[in-house]
Amino acid sequence: MENTRAALVKTAEIKPRRKKYNIPIFVILMLGAVAMIFPFVWMILSSFKTTSDIYTYPPKWLPSTFNWQNYSAVFKLIPFARYYVNSIYTSVMQTFIQIALSIFGAYAIVFLDFPGRRKITTLIRTTMFVPMVVTLIPMYLIMNSLQDTYAGIILPQVFSAFTIFLILSFFESIPRDLCDSAKLDGCGYFKIMFHVVIPNAKSSISTAAMFAFLGHWKSYTWPLIITNKDKYRTLPIGMKYLVAESSKEYQVMMAASVMAIMPVLILFVLFEKQLVKSITLTGMKS
């Protein structure tokens, strides 16, 4: 009893340790954060400025008056709404098809044993090192019949070796015992994939979907090549035409940029937890 009381007294006397902060690293990270946030904040504030505020020297941080007409001017100069809808539709469809194909490909490579699996895996991996410029002409010759169609924009960009191997790396961390147990319960390959593998890899799939959507949302080269009509043009191409129409009205271009970045910000807010979770799980892998 006396030993126990003595141990409790010593424990109570122990002072809590203070957290030690690495001040230089903290300062460097803060400076980096400010450097990355500054252009975004400047873009938002500039979207409300007048022409005189834009060309004032020295530059003004805050607008003299908040001019909301810059946003309506975007829709008057170009068919911005049409470009916006096209980008949302094509990006969502490309992301959905790309993630579906990547899940099937990653599942087949990890959980199925078939002849030539290693060679196919190596072939898919080598496509990551082929520049897009090399494939543009062959791709255009193949897809020429689908020019000025949504299919012509969507289909050539749905295959991604990076997405396959990103999802594959998480599939490999799923214990094989779970799949073996499902097989003993009479589950086939598709039931195992949809009821065992995918539910245990939601964070990685969400992260892959976010990266895929971001890549398709800002895609410029291929939609520019395959489209000639405003009906099918996407937002990055529309921004180019806006620059031509309002070359001196930077506040209008900033307003268009704010509206263009909103879907990406919304997507990040929705999938932030999954992104952080996938990074954490990646760091925990042995």
Image (spheres, helix red, strand yellow):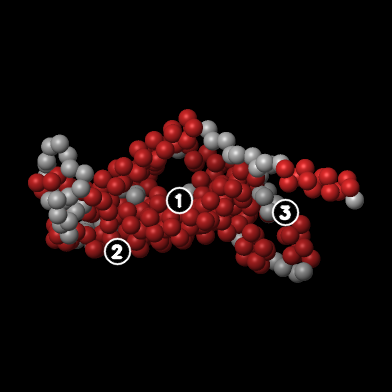
Residue 232 vertical placement versus 185 (above, below): above
Residue 61 vertical placement versus 24 (above, below): below
Q: Residue at x 51, y 52 (%)?
A: 275
**Horizontal arrangement in the rendering, residue 133 relative to residue 62 (left or right):** right
**Horizontal and vertical percent for residue 54?**
14, 44
Q: Nearer the viewer, residue 63 or 120?
A: 63
Please give the residue where the numbered disc 3 appears in the rendered image. Answer: 175
**Horizontal and vertical percent for residue 218?**
34, 50
Q: Residues within 10 Å of mark 3 (few under 14, many from 20)?
A: few
Q: Quadrant of the C terminus?
A: top right
Q: CA distance from mark 1 to mark 3?
A: 26 Å
Q: Is residue 1 visible?
A: yes
Question: Label 3 amino acid?
Answer: Pro
Q: Residue furthest toward the bottom?
A: 186
Please give the residue where the numbered disc 1 appears in the rendered image. Answer: 211
Residue 233, quarter of picture: bottom left
Give the mark, 2 or 1, whose residue is nearer the N terminus: 2
Question: Label 1 amino acid?
Answer: Phe
